[in-house]
Image: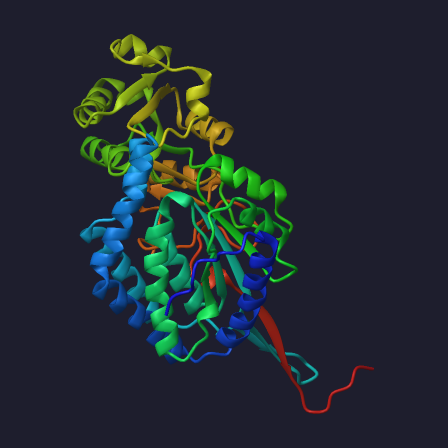
Amino acid sequence: MSQVEAVSTDITAIMADIGRNARVGAKALAIATPEQKRTALLTAAGAINAHRKQILAANAKDMAAAEEKGISKAFLDRLLLTDARIDGIIEAVRTIAELPDPVGTVIAEWDRPNGLHIERVRTPLGVIGVIFESRPNVTADAGALCIKSGNAVILRGGSDSFHSSRAIVDCLLDGLHLAGLPVECVQLVPTTDRAAVGEMLKGLDGNIDVIVPRGGKTLVARVQSEARVPVFAHLEGLVHVYIDKSADLEKAVSVTLNAKMRRTGICGAAETLLVHKDVVDTHLRPIIDALVAKGCEIRGDKSFMSIIPEAIQATEEDWKTEYEDAIISVKIVDSLEAAIAHIEHYSSHHTEAIIAEDADAVEKFFNQIDSAILMHNASTQFADGGEFGFGGEIGIATGKMHARGPVGVEQLTSFKYRVRGNGQTRP
């Protein structure tokens, strides 16, 4: 089942139709059985596997166009699909399919002295609008998570990933069709015209309940500035790794290397390394040598430069920059308190890590830093819904309202109260 690309140039009309169709799809999906949703997702996973060649061919078309534009290596890495990455997409969809269905779950229940029995029950949010840029896997993750949580989704991918996203959405539609659910539950905006984003931010006549942006700082800032509906978003991933004076050397080297260099273009990649002065003589050079060996550019403060003079002098701007590249800024700090102060000043409240064996230092780090995800002796690249056991994520939320951290099926639900009585009236 494929949704045909629009030929009309009336973007307002196109998007209004999509919004109305999404609302219809949301109503059907909200009352779908757990087995219907599971069937839809398992079928979709099978379709992605069966149409692997077509998906890779579509991605090759997107990659060729992106390379012609001179897009950065980090961007190309986010756009690229391989057999291994398709395997990951399939596994994510299957994992989401097998998660417990959140809809209708009783979160809490209690009895009142007057005999009323009250339940707080999970319900879908309704229609989710997802605006993303280059990563085709977002198409599958967002679609699968929304189906599982009973929400219709409107996907507006970037022009660079349009063909890849279209091929993946067609597989999701196959799953919905076989499960007897409306294909309008998952819709890909059929135009790359940027005016479509503006229409989504207006809410499509009240038909969008939440917007989730996945992309660079410019996109997220625009969404947060212009959206007339609630937004789950993070502006950027200014991620820090702190090496405490109690840090184990082997862990410090391996975790920092992975946090920075596993994939430099994702939001969980480390951008700043803070090293306690007491372990400079033992830990600093091995960590830096490991990073340089993998091709990482090092920028450091004055204290760091006096020890590693071959590095580049860091500027104030470096502490504020999400590089999304093989670059890291390094600062030597006098204490745990100084590290915490630096993080609180510059952090985007996405993810921070402490490498330490001192339990008191870890607890202080965890208690005093107000970021969505905090890691101890583990790579910041675990800041991912799939790694949290959510199957995937629709995004990482750094705000404090409703959802925070990886947004999975539970975070895509709200709740309602069910009150059961036996004729009670209020005096």
* Residue positioned 46% across, 47% down in the render: 192
Percent position (x, y) of residue 315? 42, 15
The foreground one among 422 and 59 is 59
Vertical comparison of 243 with 230: above or below? above
Residue 287 falls in image quadrant: top left
Q: Residue furthest right?
A: 427
For residue 266, side relative to residue 190 (left or right): left
Vertical comparison of 96 with 426: above or below? above
Which image quadrant: the N terminus? bottom left
The foreground one among 147 and 402 is 147
Query: Can residue 172 be seen in the rendering of this structure?
Result: yes
For residue 157, side relative to residue 304 (left or right): right
* Residue positioned 66% across, 79% down in the render: 112
| Render colour scheme | rainbow
The foreground one among 66 and 329 is 66
Vertical comparison of 337 with 266: above or below? above
Percent position (x, y) of residue 14? 56, 58
Residue 377 falls in image quadrant: top left
* Residue positioned 38% across, 40% down in the render: 267
Vertical comparison of 176 with 309: above or below? below
Percent position (x, y) of residue 173? 38, 68
Residue 158 falls in image quadrant: top left
Query: Can residue 137 be seen in the rendering of this structure?
Result: no
* Residue positioned 39% across, 24% down in the render: 335
Percent position (x, y) of residue 270? 34, 33
Q: Residue furthest bottom?
A: 422
